[in-house]
Image: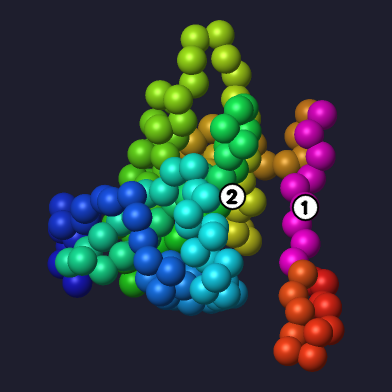
Amino acid sequence: MADNISDKITYTNNISVENYNELRKSVDWILVAPKRAAIALRNTFYICVAMYEEQPVGMIRIVSDGGYTYFLTDVIVRPDYQGHHIGTELLTRTLDYIQKDVLEGETVMISLMSAFERESFYKRFGFHKRPFDNHGSGMSAWVSRDADGNVKKF
């Protein structure tokens, strides 16, 4: 892979369900059922996808209520493309989008759940590790159902 890879990256605002799950798989995240992935992508407030030779190599999405809350999710860069500032560019473009969406006199909240031990990346952009001040810890839960109808929470 060439050292000037970042010069060859283009950015788009869409991704197929198949490519979305391929990106997730590349960083060992769970795959999303195609029906659910299609719904998630369709309901995305904003998406930015990094492309190298017509292949998605990174992405970021915003899920929002359209009011004051923005949640950054699916911040992914394929491992073999990391270190070329693609994640930085994806996050910069996304934060620029949010800043342009905020009107004078408004305040909005941008939240995210960092991947394990990736907090330092987000701190560079002004994000705070929780808990701090009067903000509690971030939390999450996953729920799945197997083919026999058994529910599993983890």
Q: Position of residue 86 (x, y in %)?
A: 33, 53
Quarter of the rendering containing residue 118: bottom right
**From which residue to which does the magenta span run?**
134-142
Q: Position of residue 85 (x, y in %)?
A: 32, 51
User: Which sits in the foreground, 86 or 10?
Assistant: 10
Dominant SS in magenta = loop
| Residue 127 visible (yes or no) | no
Type of amino acid under label 2? Glu
| Residue 31 visible (yes or no) | yes
Residue located 83% across and 78% down the image = 151
Q: Considering the numbered disc 1 on the image, is that residue within a helix, a strand or a loop?
A: loop
Along the polypeptide, which appears first: circle 1 or circle 2?
A: 2
Query: Mark 1 Cα within 10 Å, few/some/many (few <14, many 20+)?
Result: few
Residue located 46% across and 72% down the image = 21
The numbered dot on residue 119 is 2
Query: Mark 2 Cα within 10 Å, few/some/many (few <14, many 20+)?
Result: some
* 113 versus 106 height, above or below: below
The answer to whether residue 49 is left or right of residue 73 is left
The answer to whether residue 30 is left or right of residue 151 is left
Q: Considering the numbered disc 2 on the image, is that residue within a helix, a strand or a loop?
A: helix
- Residue 68 colored magenta? no
Type of amino acid under label 1? Met
Residue located 34% across and 45% down the image = 89
Q: Disc 1 designates what residue? A: 139
* 136 versus 50 height, above or below: above
Gap in angstroms between the C-alphas marked 1 and 2: 15 Å
Q: Position of residue 62 (x, y in %)?
A: 51, 45
